[in-house]
Amino acid sequence: MRITGVLSGALLALGLAVSPAVADSTPSPSSSDGGDAPTEAGTSFRTATEFEQGQTATASASTGDYLYWSFPADAGQRPTVRANVKLPEGAASSSTWQIDVYDGLRRRQACQYGAQTRTAGAGAGTVELSCTLRTVRAWSEEWADDPLPGTYYVRLTTTRLATADLGLPVGAEVEVESKDIGGSAAVDGSLAQPLVPGIAVASGQEDEEDSSAGAVLSSLEPDDGWASGWWSDRWVWTALGAALAALAGIGGYTLTRGSGRPQHVPPPPGA
């Protein structure tokens, strides 16, 4: 009974310690009212329109245009990009639409799942696309193509379109939501800086104050700042496992040790 009480008290104390850590790892919901959401899109990587996760960015364009947006993603997040294209009423034939997602190094990122490319038949009103990326890692090898913290670019365009339908007006809506994967995706290491536009030039200016070069840094970042890269809830669960293993060892030793010397065993000489 005493061992059971000790184990129960230890589990309760460790449970109280774990609860805040787990709560802290849950992302706070972003504003989805769309009040500050952009209503236009860029035409290249350099002019990509920034928007926050949870917002719905909209744009009016013409069929055949390339539309670009950008958003921030931090370590431990698994972003899902969704796009809704309102097709022109006068389209005479089918069209194929596609969204591509690039990281801060402009490397095209593969989709784990989702309808990244879809074909809309003649007369269709809308077409919906989606792309769920791999979990963003805090650090990666130089040769790897893993998604890293920083700015991500979304490109929306049509890949197959009849010549007669070029230039017709279309409307686009893009939104991004992330699932916080947590310590299961944590790695040992972190980037010196997140991969955002102009970070290399800005780092050089810190060393050379007389430099006249300019750079426009991304103005977007997660609500609670960029992750440090070394702390995750995996440390809490590791400590919990070590404590439980120690308690189990103490309990096993106490049970197997018994209450003392058996009565039929004579005491040692001189005792």
Image (tube, rainbow, N blue to C red):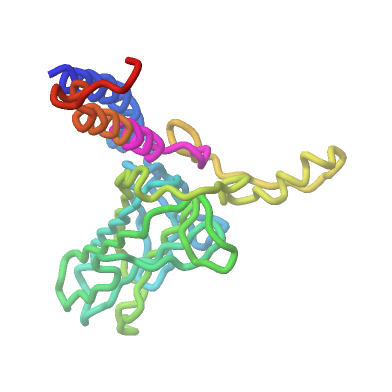
Quarter holding the C terminus?
A: top left
Q: Is residue 22 above or below residue 3?
A: below
Q: Main secondary structure of the magenta part?
A: helix
Q: Residue at x 54, y 55 (%)?
A: 47
Residue 116 vs residue 65: left or right? left
* Quarter of the figure that contains the N terminus: top left
Q: Nearer the viewer, residue 17 or 155?
A: 17
Give the mark count. Answer: 0
Q: Is residue 30 visible?
A: no
Q: Which residues are magenta?
A: 227-244
Task: Give percent across and percent down for residue 268.
Answer: 30, 23
Which residue is at 20% across, 74% downward? 120
* Extreme residue toward the bottom, this view: 163
Asked if one can make out residue 247 in the rendered structure from this viewpoint, the answer is: yes
The one nearer the camera, 136 or 12, is: 12
Residue 6 location (% of width, % of height): 22, 19
Residue at the spot x=47%, y=62% of the render? 146
Q: Is residue 29 above or below residue 178?
A: above
Is 115 magenta? The answer is no
In the figure, is residue 96 to the left or right of 134?
left
Give the left or right position of residue 118, taking residue 106 as reference.
left
Q: Please give the name of the residue rendered at 43% of the width and 67% of the height, measured from the top-left corner.
A: 66
Q: Nearer the viewer, residue 75 or 215?
A: 75
Residue 19 position by quadrant: top left
Can you give x and y, in whole percent of width and height, for residue 239 in the image? 37, 33
Q: Nearer the viewer, residue 99 or 8?
A: 8
Q: Position of residue 133 (x, y in %)?
A: 35, 59
Compared to 202, does 269 lie above or below?
above
